[in-house]
Every structure is written in structure tokens, then in C-alpha cells.
Amino acid sequence: MAKGLDVGTMNIVCAEMEGENVVFVQQRNAFLELDYSDLTKMMLDNANVQYVAKGDKIYVLGDDAMKFATVFRKSTRRPMKTGILSPEEKEAVPIIKLIVEKVLGEPNYENEVVCISSPANPIDSDIETTYHRKTMEALVKKLGYNPFTIDEGLAIIYSELADNSFTGIGISFGAGMTNVTAAYFAAPIVSFSIARGGDWIDENAAKATGTPKEQVCAIKESNFELKYEVELGSVEGALAIYYDYLITYVVENLKRKLTEVTPPQVDFPVVLAGGTSKPRGFKRIFEEKISQVGLPVDVSQIRMAKDPLFSVARGCLIAAKTKEE
Ligand SMILES: Nc1ncnc2c1ncn2[C@@H]1O[C@H](COP(=O)(O)OP(=O)(O)O)[C@@H](O)[C@H]1O
Ligand SMILES: [Mg+2]
């Protein structure tokens, strides 16, 4: 059986087999803290919402937190920031444990293998990923599973590049981070992360235009398209500028990292995944940057993952099944 678990800054996704099909269970990686009162408790019970009561607080988790934030006029909080457990959030570990429990469910049997995605070490910040990785492994082990981790970029390669013997470049453009892996027969030759992603685009476009970042994010997620011409001064224009900046930064760093190793002289297809890669026009801009900057490998093609939001979880599932066999 085995399961794949994608632990992202915005979304936590579990993948498992149901007969011949892969099924996904997803929750927002967010929570809402409410003061305990009989009225609040009754409202949540009536709405059939699961929550946990702790001391004088009530915690609503995942997608329900997003739904009830407006009802209670409170902001949701997030256990993770820039790809790892947030050092600024004191409830990070107990809350993420509950959300992981929600998506993974009980093991089908003792010590069922789970492959968890983990960020690679970033090149542009002092973020250290060991604590995050070890804590996630320990949480999943506590639930009765036998966990191991792989880099998020490698998960994309497992998911999308079986037809090329798991050789190529996988890039996950997430909320908190961008993760990049180049692999040769499933062995990483370059793997790194960049502490910038969708959140970084939202924050900067919000600052530049004086717009609340929730509003910027909503515009970005609904029908936003990366066009040739941008309307200067608009939120869309600012989004396009930061998209361009992020993609350029990723491609330049990929070039630099590949130059440091001696990559084998074979075709390296590139697969793009993650929520941030979803706007129309994203692939075109990426292709343009690759041809401008040039990589020290033969890029045979550039394509989008079939399902950008589920690709990492699917790759983790494939890695877990391979290990269990
Ligand atoms: N249709 C869309 N267009 C642009 N960005 C999107 C879209 N859907 C989701 N996103 C962005 O993708 C990011 C979440 O993607 P995801 O791969 O789940 O990230 P993570 O793995 O970090 O949780 C967020 O920044 C979100 O705003
Ligand atoms: Mg992700």
C-alpha cells in the first residue's frame, strides 16, 4: 500500500492507492484560534466542524479554519513559513500534527511506509531544514507509520519523469518556497531551494501597490494570466513583475548550481509544478528565461506537471511504493 505526504507551507496533501487509482486528500495548512465559550462551541457543533479544545482556547483546523475565519472575523494562522515549521508560531508542532493526522488517517497496517516531501537546503537564506524534516518524521512515526523523506524537487521527478528513467529537472513552485532538483536515474545531482514563492510574490505585489495581500492573492488565484503586455500600476502588473523576477532568479541559480557539477551529457526534460506555476503564460516565460540564460545541460523539453497541486504527493507515493517493494 504505502502513502505519499506533501507537507507544504499552504497545503498538506496525502496520496494513496485506491484500487488502480491514486486518490488525494488535501487540507489547508492553517488554523484558527478562538476563545473558548459555550456559544462558540455550540456554533461549531451545529456546523459539524471538528475542532480541538485546549485550555481556554478552541482550535479549528485546515479548510474549516479558512471557512470560519470570516464568520468569527479573525485571521487564520499558519504553522509553517518559507517551507519549514514556523519558529514564530508557538502552536506550530501540535497543530501540524493534527492536520497531518487528518489527511493521513490511520495506517492500513503497522509500519506502513510513508514518504514525506521535504525542502532542500536553501541557497539564499540561513534556513536550516533538519529540524523541520526530523520533526515531521517523528510526528508521522508517532501515528504508527514508517516514514522517510525526499526532496520536493525529486518528488516531481518521481511523479512526472518515469518515461525518461527519472532523469531530468523537477521544479516545485510552492507558496513558501521554490524547490529544484536535477536527477540522473533518480539520483539527485543538484538539489536546492529558494526561500521565495507565491507568498513572496503576494507580499511584494501588495507592498508595491498598497493593496492588502489577501486581495492580491485572490486576484492572482482567479484567472490571472502572464501576458506580454502588463498594465503599469495595476495589481496584475505588479504580480507580473514579481513572477518575472522569481522565474529569472530560479533559472539563474539553476544554471549556477549545474555549472558547479559535471552533469552527464544526456537529455534533461524540465517539469514545472506547484500552485505558483498555475497561471496561463507561466511556461512561456520560463522557456524564454531558459533560452536567454542558457543551461549547461541539453533541455529536451519543458512541460507542466499534469496536476501541479498534487504532483509532489503523487511522487512521494511512488517513492514510498518503490521502497516498500
Ligand atoms: N490558480 C492559481 N494561480 C496562481 N497561484 C496559485 C493558484 N492556485 C494556487 N496558487 C498559489 O500557489 C501556492 C500554493 O501552492 P502549493 O504548491 O500548494 O504550495 P505549498 O506546497 O507551499 O503549500 C500559493 O502561493 C497560492 O496562492
Ligand atoms: Mg509544495
Image (tube, helix red, strand yellow):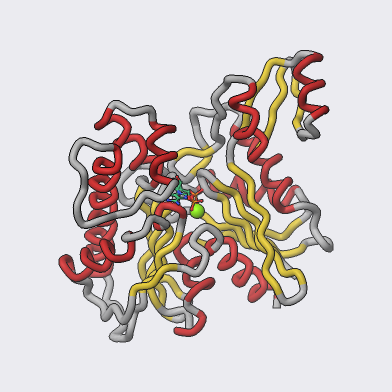
254 sits left or right of 94 in the view: left
Q: Nearer the viewer, residue 106 or 201?
A: 201
Residue 226, given in percent of the width and then of the height, sits at 29, 54
Q: Check the picture and name the quadrant holding the C terminus.
A: bottom right
281 sits left or right of 13 in the view: left
Q: Is residue 128 visible?
A: no
Q: Check the picture and name the quadrant holding the N terminus.
A: bottom right
Q: Looking at the image, which residue is at 75% across and 23% down?
A: 54
* Relative to 11, residue 316 above or below: below
237 sits left or right of 149 in the view: left
Q: Looking at the image, which residue is at 52% across and 55% down?
A: 118
Q: Looking at the image, which residue is at 17% across and 66% down?
A: 293
* Relative to 170, residue 67 above or below: above
Residue 200, given in percent of the width and then of the height, sits at 35, 41
Kindly give the residue lying farthest to the left in the view shown.
292
Tell me which corner region of the image, top left, top right, bottom left or bottom right, holds residue 16.
Answer: bottom right
* Relative to 237, residue 321 above or below: below
